[in-house]
Image (spheres, helix red, strand yellow):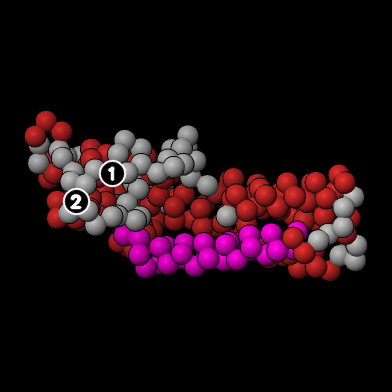
Amino acid sequence: MLAGVVLVIIQSARGMRANAPYSQRDGRLSLFTVIVTDLQLVLGLALYTVLSPLTTQGIFPHFAPAMKDRVLRFWAVEHLVTMMLAIIAIHVVRVVVKKADNSALKHKRTFYGFALVLLLLWAGMPWPWKPYGRPLMGEAPSAVPSAPSGRSLGSLSLRELTIVLFGKRGHQSLDFMLPLPMGEDRGEGIHLLQKRMQGHLSAQAQSASRL
């Protein structure tokens, strides 16, 4: 999705600079980017509403206390809102471009419209340097989690357990949105992590109710 938006911006910039006609190739590139965006929307909504234990079992039942946590608030609200705005913008831009009556205007509207989409995507992406960041190329977890120094999974803290399951960067975003079924031990660890997450949010909710 991000790569498609960047390619459209580059193509439209070239068209503006060369005063080139708006070709079928230009239209097909933007259409392809819209299709990929819509597919990503479907996948994202499926994760958000059904497949991800982070939202269905962790955030939704304890929404108020989750909003006080920067990482959980990003995944529950900020990421969703910015991505939805980007998807709406990309559809609006395509309609506006179609209504343009000359090639120069089509290239100009495409360039500035997709530049806006790129800014929204940039704001809503979990970049690695953010507190909720994820690795750009992904980090393959070990097939079977092993506790440090021979300790059992049950004795690990929430942060330690997440590192064991998802690598050193996983704890930054509690990244178990797509847990891979890589063995019975890993499944047990993920289940334990979900329970720890629910307990963490429940404790936050109880503390907030006492205030």
Left or right of residue 194: residue 84: right
Q: Is residue 188 visible?
A: no
Kind of residue at disc 1: Pro
Q: Which numbered disc flags the more N-terminal residue, 1 or 2? A: 1
Q: Quadrant of residue 153?
A: top left
Residue 99 image offset from top left, x and y in percent = 84, 69
Secondary structure at badge 1 equals: loop
Magenta span includes 107: no
Seen as rendered, the residue at the extreme top is 149
Residue 8 image offset from top left, x and y in percent = 70, 52
> Around disc 1, counting alpha carbons within 10 Å, would you say few (fewer than 14), some (14 to 19), or many (20 or more)?
some
Residue lying at 67% horizontally and 65% vertically, measured from the top left: 31
> Around disc 2, counting alpha carbons within 10 Å, would you say few (fewer than 14), some (14 to 19), or many (20 or more)?
many
Left or right of residue 77: residue 114: right
Give the Cα distance between marks 1 and 2.
10 Å
Kind of residue at disc 2: Arg
Disc assigned to residue 186: 2
> Magenta stretch mostly in which secondary structure?
helix
For the magenta stretch, what is the residue range? 26-54
Q: Is residue 18 visible?
A: yes
* Residue position marked by numbered label 1 in the rendering: 141
Magenta span includes 45: yes
Evaluate if marks 1 and 2 touch, with contact meaning CB atoms under 8 Å apart: yes
Q: Nearer the viewer, residue 63 or 139?
A: 139
Residue 75's place in the image compared with 136, above or below, is below
